[in-house]
Image (cartoon, rainbow, N blue to C red):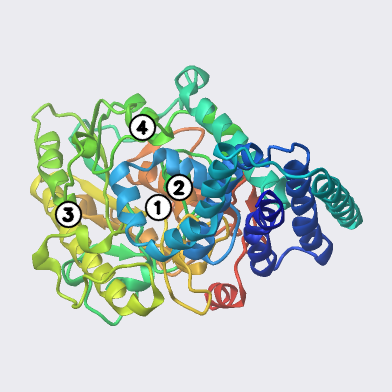
Amino acid sequence: MPAIVLCLLPVALIVPNIVLDITENLYPPTIKAANILLPLGIYILLLSVWKKNGWMSLFMIPIMVLCAFQIVLLYLYGQSIIAIDMFLNVATTNSREVGELLKNLKEAILIVVVLYTPFIVAAIYLIIKKKYINTTAMKRGKIIGLITSIAGVICLALSAKPMPMRTIFPLNVSSNIVSALSRVEESRNYIYTSSKFVFNAKTTRTDSLPEIYVLVIGETARAGNWQLCGYQRHTNPKLSSRDRLIFFPKTLSESNTTHKSVPLILSHLSAREFGDSLKSVKCIFKAFEESGFKTAWFSNQQRNHSYIDEFGNQADTCLFISDDGCEHFDEELIPLLTEFCSQHDKKKKFVVLHSYGSHFNYDERCPDKYHVYEPCQNTEADKANRQSLINAYDNTVLYTDYFLDKVASVIDSLHCPGAMLYLADHGEDIFDDNRERFLHASPTATFWQLHVPMFIYANSEYSINFKEKLGYAEDNSHKIVSSSSTAFNTILDIAGIDTPFLNKSQSLVSPSYSYKDFCFLNDYNEAVDASQAGMNKTDLSLMKNW
């Protein structure tokens, strides 16, 4: 049996490498060969250096865990290594979300259990029975392992860009763990590294009349399922009937992960500046505060020890309603908004609402009365369930329509100039093509993950006082928009706030707005163009149609 473990365990551990060689089309053949040979050789060597290879097998459980995680990820996304963002997603995702996802990945979990559990059981048996590998098998294993490893190193050396820490599993994953821990530590020190930052912001309006501005950050909303964007289903019946609502159908997010896209939205940083500068800047609340506004952050998501928490804490009032561990529907944010805006202190006010929107598990994001499209309960992660998943997703959009209409009604009821800017942090894959991609936050992006809804709504008082800004928004409504780059600049411009950090060319209510080239914030916090973001011909074709 010890010899069998020596033969079979390395093969089982190399399964993710084999699949990655198939899925990672950007890798050259030499890298693909190295990705198989180098780890395989090392595994064989490790199991050959000690006669008690039962113990050595147990010492390799961390590698088995990484392999298991990788297999589940491949099942879910169909490609990509365990990225830095994936580890950060685990760290910033609450237990309820994890449970919702895992219960829909039964097949992937079963594959992992069947593949690796027998080796753990066999290792324990070898230890208890004191069975050891013989000298001949050890020598043979060392020779085979050494030759295989050397062959892997040669293949790696022949590659134009070896980059083993990005291309060889599990070296790349181990490196990503270190990077993820570094980013977590960076966010923990944010309060100190950003302490001296100021916007030097001021209002450009001389009157002291109250004004109300609301920024709503949606969650996992794909524009293609919004009626306002031309979707055939009536998923936005209330918003579609509103005057002074300006929709931007050609909007792209620069990130497909919440813990990056929300800070991008709330800061003045572009994707190109994000990685180096985020730890040193304050968010949009500071600019409004310097301009004399009273500010509030109301979120239907739990605190997750990320920059989002730190940014929310910069508001005068900060509340995460899901910190109680219970599930809440987004409409529960409305009374908080109403109470805050109705305070008779004659102060201008700015509120950010962070909704739960259309986050998976879709059928749990809205009350039953919004289950208009049926069937919608079969939401297991399987392409065969796509129609049910789409129905459930469309129901969440219908509920979001109701929620946002309520926000607009609050702004209308205050009888002072007010406006809302809505945009989603990112979109979602729902088995849209033969790649069979599902959910978001994969290291390689798709059009569906980046195409997001965005609109401006203004009440009648704002329209009377600042009609020209709405006119500019109408003029810009058919242009391509980066949600991440424009949100900060647009909401400040709407509110009449000036700061050296305001970029009018990225304000949708400015006559000088111009679209800049699209870039995607990848796993290494590098801003890359669409061709380097992992998009295929379908994604690029959809973008080029604009």
Camera-nearest label, 2 or 3: 2
Q: Which mark is residue 408?
A: 3
The quarter of the picture where residue 537 lies is bottom right
Distance (Cα) linking label 4 and label 3: 26 Å
Camera-nearest label, 3 or 1: 1
Q: Amino acid at mark 3?
A: Ala
Q: Residues within 10 Å of mark 3 (few under 14, many from 20)?
A: many
Q: Which mark is residue 131?
A: none
Distance (Cα) linking label 3 and label 1: 20 Å
Q: Is residue 274 above or below residue 184?
A: below
Q: Are marks 1 and 2 in contact (CB under 8 Å)?
A: yes
Q: Which residue position is annotated with label 1?
A: 425
Q: Secondary structure at mark 4?
A: helix
Q: Which residue position is annotated with label 2?
A: 261
The quarter of the picture where residue 109 lies is bottom left
Q: Residues within 10 Å of mark 1 (few under 14, many from 20)?
A: many
Distance (Cα) linking label 4 and label 1: 15 Å
Q: Residue 210: percent from the left, percent from the top? A: 18, 35
Q: Amino acid at mark 2?
A: Ser
Q: Secondary structure at mark 2?
A: helix
Q: Residue 441: percent from the left, percent from the top? A: 48, 54
